[in-house]
């Protein structure tokens, strides 16, 4: 039987959305320049779990400063910033967490993977390490540094023992948050479709809370947005409460966990109404302008979960990995860099992150016209990375050119 092509598998609108996201995601990868070496590493974390990483270095150079970049649910082992940072003289490490799928992610265990990576860099002679939190990595790196400086977590949100107050978490020397949001629970809640009335049925909705119903907008009224925002938080909390109760029920039966689906998770009004938190972004999300199709796709953001991963990664009331729970425990310099044309990380995210930082050494810098992945914007990608380098150099955290 011949293989089906994308058009056979999906509807035209869904295929377009999927292709768009794949094209955007490809911006995370870049070819390896001839003058850059890349080592593939298998690193063992403190709890015995293994994860993978890549280490980029300029050929013939022994770096003393390092960059670490990681996302909890995506491999950053070929991130576009790694080779440019290596050429600048950094040891640039891209990490893939121990988890095979987004549905497995436990944020507290991700911290142990970051720790083993920093330990390795220290062992090979790197004296100063900067954590780079790009996109969903922003909440992760904020969480890591907070626990490295002032640890508080002794168990996961599901109650599993994981005592970070006793873990070896070497603190970094600075954090860079670029094109980052306010943590996975916050951004998911901002994206959740609150019109869903039955979590088991993706088509059962309340029309009065449907942002795709022309009767509601765009543009959207203040009254609609107030109801919409409250219903988004209510939906997240409803799923979280169900997950907590279901977990207790299963554990009483000797069952550890359960998989479940969360439908319709790409419905931020900002995608279609550019008057909300205005910026240079175009209509749509990273997958293209057909947001309705992306919201209804069978595979999308936070679509597949387990009870334990939801409580750690996405539960607004339960997750530890929220910058507003973390950045007040971070004393090192923090740089927030944000592209003004980012379709998913809105300007308020950068402003809020900046305001949350209590370190006296902090800066907010805008990249005019920059999109989330710098797709088709090599000059803005270069501008961003050079600004990061110069900012670190001013603090003696960057290599001499």
Image (tube, grey):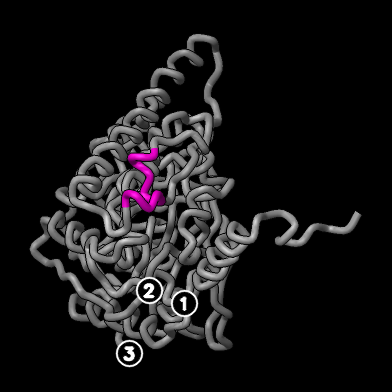
How would you rate the neighbour count of disc 1 (Cα within 10 Å): few for under 14, some for 14-19, many for 20 or more? some
Seen in the image, is 83 located left or right of residue 224? right
Camera-side residue: 299 or 379?
A: 299
User: Which residue reaches farthest front?
Assistant: 215
Compared to residue 381, the image places residue 176 above or below, namely above
CB under 8 Å between discs 2 and 1: yes
The N terminus sits in image quarter? bottom right
| Front one among 68 and 134 | 134
Name the mark nearer the viewer: 2 or 3: 2
Q: Earlier in the sequence, mark 1 or mark 3?
A: 1
Label 3 SS: loop
User: Farthest residue toward the left?
Assistant: 360
Helix, strand or loop under label 1? loop
**Image mark for residue 375:** 1
Report the quarter where the C terminus lies.
bottom left
Q: Tell whether label 3 touches label 2 (CB within 8 Å).
A: no
Q: Is residue 43 visible?
A: yes
Where residue 223 appears, x then y in whole percent? 19, 45
Residue 382, picture quadrant: bottom left
User: Local crowd at mark 2 within 10 Å, few (<14), some, or many (≥20)?
Assistant: many
- Extreme residue toward the top, this view: 252
**Stretch of the chain drawn in magenta:** 207-216
- Distance between the alpha carbons at the discs numbered 2 and 1: 7 Å
Q: Main secondary structure of the magenta part?
A: loop
Query: Which label belongs to residue 371?
Result: 2
Which residue shows up at 33% across the image and 71% down it? 281
Residue farthest right in this picture: 1
Along the viewing direction, whichever of 221 and 252 lies nearer the viewer: 221
- Please check the rendered image and state whether residue 273 is part of the magenta-colored stretch, yes or no: no
The label shown at residue 401 is 3
Judged from the image, the secondary structure of the residue bearing numbered disc 2 is loop
């Amino acid at each position: 039987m011949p293989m089906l092509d994308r058009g056979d598998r999906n509807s035209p609108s869904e295929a377009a959305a999927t292709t768009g996201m794949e094209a955007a995601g490809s911006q995370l990868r870049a070819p390896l320049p001839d003058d850059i070496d890349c080592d593939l590493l298998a690193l063992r974390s403190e709890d015995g779990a293994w994860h993978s990483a890549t280490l980029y270095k300029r050929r013939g150079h022994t770096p003393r400063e390092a960059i670490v970049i990681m996302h909890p649910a995506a491999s950053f082992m070929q991130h576009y910033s790694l080779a440019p940072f290596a050429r600048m003289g950094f040891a640039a490490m891209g990490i893939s967490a121990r988890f095979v799928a987004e549905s497995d992610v436990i944020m507290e265990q991700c911290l142990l993977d970051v720790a083993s990576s920093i330990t390795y860099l220290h062992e090979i002679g790197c004296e100063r390490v900067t954590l780079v939190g790009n996109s969903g990595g922003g909440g992760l790196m904020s969480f890591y540094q907070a626990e490295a400086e002032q640890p508080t977590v002794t168990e996961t949100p599901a109650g599993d023992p994981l005592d970070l107050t006793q873990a070896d978490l070497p603190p970094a020397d600075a954090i860079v948050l670029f094109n980052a949001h306010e943590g996975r629970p916050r951004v998911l809640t901002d994206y959740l479709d609150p019109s869903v009335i039955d979590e088991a049925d993706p088509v059962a909705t309340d029309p009065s809370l449907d942002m795709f119903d022309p009767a509601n907008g765009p543009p959207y009224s203040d009254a609609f947005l107030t109801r919409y925002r409250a219903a988004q938080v209510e939906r997240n909390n409803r799923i979280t409460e169900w997950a907590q109760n279901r977990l207790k029920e299963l554990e009483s039966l000797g069952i550890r966990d359960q998989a479940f689906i969360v439908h319709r998770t790409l419905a931020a009004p900002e995608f279609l109404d550019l008057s909300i938190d205005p910026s240079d972004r175009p209509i749509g999300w990273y997958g293209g302008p057909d947001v309705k199709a992306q919201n209804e796709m069978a595979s999308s953001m936070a679509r597949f979960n387990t009870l334990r991963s939801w409580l750690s990664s996405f539960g607004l009331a339960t997750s530890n990995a929220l910058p507003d729970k973390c950045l007040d425990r971070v004393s090192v310099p923090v740089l927030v860099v944000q592209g003004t044309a980012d379709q998913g990380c809105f300007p308020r995210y950068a402003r809020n992150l900046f305001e949350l930082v209590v370190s006296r050494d902090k800066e907010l810098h805008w990249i005019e016209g920059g999109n989330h992945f710098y797709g088709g914007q090599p000059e803005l990608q270069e501008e961003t990375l050079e600004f990061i380098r110069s900012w670190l150099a001013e603090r003696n955290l960057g290599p001499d050119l």
